[in-house]
Amino acid sequence: MEALNSLIAGDAFFTSLMATTAIIVLVITFQSVFFKLFTKGIKLSLRVAVIGLPRSGKTTLITVVFDAIMSGRLARYASVSGLETVERLTKYLSLINSGVNLGPTTDEEVFAYRYVVNRKRFGIFSTKYDVEIADFPGEYSEELSRDLQSRVKQPSLFQKEFFSWIIRADRYIFVIDAEAYRRSFMKHGSVGRPDYVSEVEIAFKNAVLQLKQEMLDERVYERPLLILFAKCDCFLLDEEEFALTYEDEKLRLSYRDKRFDQRIDDTKIANNFQKQLGKMAGDFGELLSFLRNNFKTIETVFHSSYYERGPFTKGNQKVVEFASPP
């Protein structure tokens, strides 16, 4: 009996020793992880893909969004990352301020504008976000939107850097050009849909179908989507002003253009502006419905890269938030 009691006591001691050892290991591990988080911070990333047809205003959009981030509420936490990003932003902001059209992107592959955000959580943990906003030549967006039969004939497209980047993006911004829509509407007349609507609808529908073909449907569905109607300031101009303002080489608008102040305050112009926005959204209704059924989180904004007041305040701010970490 004494031998049995001795054996039981030994097992209890061994069990207690193992439990104590396990607790010590857990404490050491927790302290090590906590120390790393406290001293080095939690590093996260955010990748935003901006997709649109050629000359839809993607590069201008990215430039003014970066300027807003670096001069807004994130300014104290954010810094531009990379010499090339700094050089491009400086160059493009100078051109935009001079009223010069940036023109189509000429890079052969993806260029990702980068910035870093460092934040403290609960006054203790430091969280570092590496944010990338990718700009693609519009021609690549056209390739992405080709019908599936054409894609089979060009399998090399799947290997391109821009398509790989899109697949790995965390969020998407689909850019629709309000200026191109208005031009198409003026040319087409008031009967039926403008040709540009059909062009955009086919392009984005095919793009989504191809993304779903490359990835699991659920992976596409879970990613936030922002549908951005760019250059909506064009609806504040009459037809003559519109024709003169949106020339190919000289845009005749400057960043934060003050000429829109009086237009926004004019009730007649403001009402017509809202009417035009509503008609444009209605013409793209079928596409918007398709996108809502294919993405869990979707928002629509009317944006101007040249004016921030009035009807553009909320939309412009929403784009900045969408391109920023939480």
Image (spheres, rainbow, N blue to C red):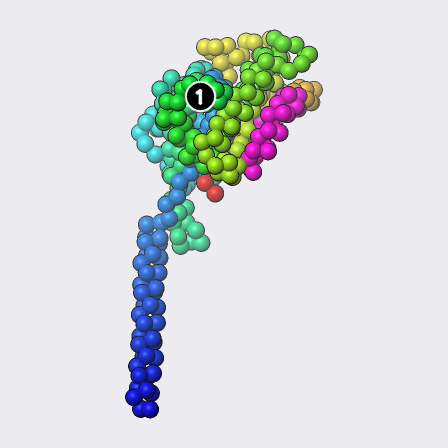
The vertical placement of 322 against 233, above or below, is below
**Can you give x and y, in whole percent of width and height, for residue 63 in the image?**
43, 26
With respect to residue 1, does 323 lie above or below? above
x%, y% of residue 224? Answer: 52, 36
Residue 308 in the image: x percent, y percent? 54, 28
Q: How far across and down, in percent of the image, does residue 222 sit?
A: 51, 39
The one of 104 and 172 positioned closer to us in this rendering: 172
Magenta span includes 279: yes
Using the image as rendered, state which of residue 313 and residue 170 is in the foreground: 170
The answer, for residue 71, to whether it is visible in the render is no
Q: Quadrant of residue 28?
A: bottom left
Residue pictured at 55% horizontal, 35% vertical: 295
Q: Which residues are magenta?
A: 278-304
**Tag 1 residue:** 151
Rendered view: 309 above or below 150? below
Q: Is residue 19 visible?
A: yes
Looking at the image, which residue is at 43% across and 51% down?
121
